[in-house]
Amino acid sequence: MRDAILLTPGPLTTSLATKTAMLNDWGSWDSRFNALTAGVCADLLAIAQAQDSHVCVPLQGSGTFAVEAAIGTLVPRDGALLVLVNGAYGLRMAQLAEVMGRQVATLNFADDQPVCPQQLAEYLAAHPQISHVGAIHCETSTGLLNPLAAIATVVAAAGRQLIIDSMSGFGALPVDAHELPFAALVSSANKCLEGVPGIAFVLVAKQALAASRGNSHSLSLDLYDQHAYLARTGQWRYTPPTHVLAALRSALDQFHAEGGQPARLARYQANAERLRAGLAALGLQPYLPAAVQAPIIYTAHAPTHPSYQFMALYQAVRARGFILYPGKLTQLETFRVGCIGAIDHAEIDQALAALGAALDDLGWCSTGVKP
Ligand SMILES: *Cc1c(COP(=O)(O)O)cnc(C)c1O
C-alpha cells in the first residue's frame, strides 16, 4: 500500500526521487558535500532573483528556528519589531521576538482580512521607534494571502526593514528581489519546494547581514556567524542534516524540470481550484473569500451536523489513505486541506472521494445527498 497522502502544508507528500535521494551517506567536511550546500544556496537565491543583493544562509531545524534566527540576528537589541498579525504564524513571530527580549508591537487584522497597507503606513508614521516589520506571506493557519508587494513598498518608503515569513509560499508564490525590497525572507525545505523537513533558510540582504554582527542573543541561531563560517570554510557550523540537504537538491532538480516557480504555482492553482469545487460539491463551504485565498491550503467550515468531531472525520479519511489537517481558528469549527506537495489532479480527486465517503459513513454529509 502507498503511504498516506499528506494534505498538510509541510511535511507534505514527496516524490519517490526525493525520498531515494536520501540513500547515501555524506561526510559533512567533504568537498562534495560543500559543493552540494553551495549549489542549493545558489538555487534558492535564484528563485528570488536575489543573487546580487542577498546571501542564502541555511539553518538546521524547522522553519520556526529560522524565523527566530532572522529576528534575533537582524533586529538590534535596542530595535523594535512590528509584526503584522492575521493568524497563528504572525502571533508566533511576535511571541518569539518577545521571548528573546526584543521590543515588539503587533498590528492586528481579523483572520479573514489581509494586512491593510494604508493602515501599516499610518502606523509606521506614528511610531518612529519601529525599526523592523515582520510579515507573513501566506498565513498558513487559514490559507490567506497577504499583499506582500504593497507591504514591502510601504515599509521601504518608511525607511524600515522588512522580514518576511514566506515559509508556505516560497517556490510557488512569486518573489522578485529586484522589485520587492526585503532585509530577510525565511522559508524551509518541506513546503512548496517539496523537500523533507530538517532545513530552513534565510535570504538575507548583504548590507543587513553585514550590520548584524553581535546582535544575536543565541549562538546556534546566529545567522551572521553561520554565514561567516560557511563563507570561510564551505561548511555548516555544527552537524548539518546531510540526507535532508541531498533530498532538497533532488527536490530542486525536480522543481527546475517542472518549469520552476510559474509551473509550481500553476499546478497548485489547478489543485486548489479542483479542491474548492469538490469541497463545495460536498456541501463544505470555504472559510476565506476566493480573492484572498492562496493556492496552498484551504480552510473549510466543518459539517454542521450536531455530532461532528474532527478526530472522527480525520480517522475515517485516514483509513482511506489521506491525512487532513485540523483547523487553527479558535472561534469557528473548521478543518484544513492542503493542496501542495508532490500531488496532482488524481490525488485531489481521490482525496475528495475519500472525504465524501467518510462523511457519508459518518452520516455527516452536509448536502444531505449521498455522493
Ligand atoms: C510552516 C510554517 C512556519 C514554520 O513552521 P515549522 O513547524 O517550524 O516548520 C512558519 N510560518 C508559516 C507561515 C508556516 O506555514
Image (cartoon, grey):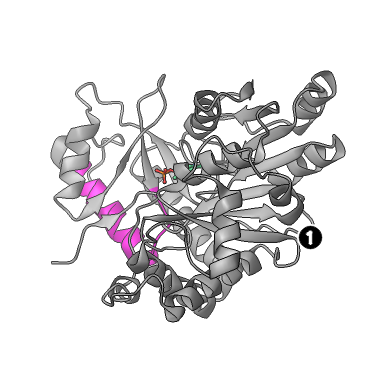
Picture residue at 41% right of the left edge, 67% below the top: 245
- Residue that numbered label 1 is attached to: 178
The image quadrant that residue 29 belongs to is bottom left
**Of residues 128 and 169, the one drawn nearer to the viewer in this rendering:** 128
Does the stretch in magenta take in 113?
no
Q: Residue 177 appears at what percent x and percent y?
A: 73, 58
Task: Specify few, some or many for label 1: CA neighbours under 10 Å numbering under 14, 14-19, or 20 or more.
Answer: few
In the rendered structure, the answer to whether residue 258 lies left or right of residue 213 reads left
Q: Quadrant of the N terminus?
A: bottom left
Q: Position of residue 247 (x, y in %)?
A: 37, 70
Quadrant assignment, res 203: bottom right
- From the top left corner, tell me how far across and down residue 162 is, in percent: 71, 41
Magenta stretch holds residue 355: yes
Q: Nearer the viewer, residue 218 or 111?
A: 218
Classify mark 1: helix, strand or loop.
Answer: loop
Instruction: Look at label 1 and name its amino acid.
Output: His
* Secondary structure mostly seen in the magenta stretch: helix
Q: Does residue 344 appear left or right of residue 216 in this picture?
A: left
What segment carries the magenta color? 338-360
Q: Is residue 309 above or below residue 236?
A: above
* Residue 186: x %, y % from top left: 57, 49
